[in-house]
Amino acid sequence: MTFDRSIKIAPSILSADFANFGAECEAIEAQGADWVHVDVMDGHFVPNITFGPATCAAIRPHIKGVMDVHLMIAPVDPYIEAFANAGADVITAHVEAGPHIHRTMQAIKGAGAKAGVALNPATPASEIEYLLDMVDLVCVMTVNPGFGGQKFIHSQVEKVRQLRAMIGDRPIHIEIDGGVDPTTAPLVANAGADVLVAGSAVFRGGSVLDPAPYGANIRSIREAATSIEV
Ligand code: DX5
Ligand code: ZN
């Protein structure tokens, strides 16, 4: 994985056909996705359950690019090795998921993956000040984690701006997760985000048998994020 700050669209397979993940991953990549975002939920840290490392390992051969695994689980540390072995390029854990997020970041890097830290909407940017010299990605949740299709929380744009200033020249991605569509993408891109996760706004209107709408949706998010000064 090389680092750059160009806009990257990361469709979340939370909005894909759960009976057809392999084909869905291939379809979104063929339609222009930069990363594939994989939402792991445990029914404990968040009020929803998705899947675990076995599913990640099964879809890995169907992804050519970056597999971006977002862990909405607590505890995190006992499962890091399994997600790294499943082929995750990026593993993101929540700062709210336990008392030892620094150790969790060390464990992710020790397992050979890029380390991401996610912040819930109520968590201030200052929480991760002392992690900035060790993380590869900061994920700003622009909805409360657990479900796709929720409304973008506008107060988070200011947090993105703060994080961008805190990060300075460090090679750290700022990822936005939740409610990203062509109307909200320019707000966060302008504030300094470079990885835009989108579930419903990418998968809307398409399917594995008719994937062209995925491409049109990805293009309209990318165009909105790259062309508008707000
Ligand atoms: C929410 C997940 C998101 C979600 C985004 O807990 O982390 O990745 O799938 O979905 P949309 O884009 O529909 O808000
Ligand atoms: Zn996510």
Image: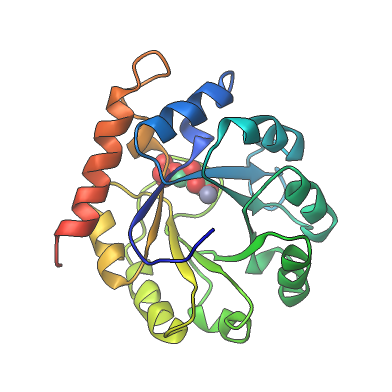
Q: Residue furthest front?
A: 2
Q: Is residue 61 above or below residue 112?
A: above
Q: How many numbered circles does the render carry?
A: 0
* Residue ID at (73%, 60%): 112
- Report whether residue 164 is seen: yes
Which residue is drawn at the image coordinates 76% and 58% (left, top)? 76
Query: Can you say which quadrant of the picture contains the N terminus?
Result: bottom right
Q: Quadrant of residue 90?
A: bottom right
Query: Where is residue 136 drawn, in percent x and y?
Result: 57, 69
Q: Nearer the viewer, residue 196 or 136?
A: 136
Seen from the viewer's position, the closer of residues 40 and 132 is 132
Q: Residue at x 47, y 66 (%)?
A: 3
Task: Tell me if residue 128 comes above or below residue 228 in the rendering.
Answer: below
**Considering depth in this image, is 24 or 16 the residue closer to the camera?**
24
In this picture, residue 191 sits left or right of residue 134? left
Left or right of 157 on screen, residue 170: right
Q: Is residue 223 left or right of residue 82?
A: left
Left or right of 36, for residue 46: right
Q: Position of residue 107 (x, y in %)?
A: 78, 67
* Quadrant the C terminus occupies: bottom left
Task: Specify the farthest residue to the right.
Answer: 78
Residue 222 in the image: state x and y as whole percent: 26, 49
Q: Is residue 149 visible?
A: no
Coloring basis for residues: rainbow
Q: Position of residue 47 (x, y in %)?
A: 63, 44
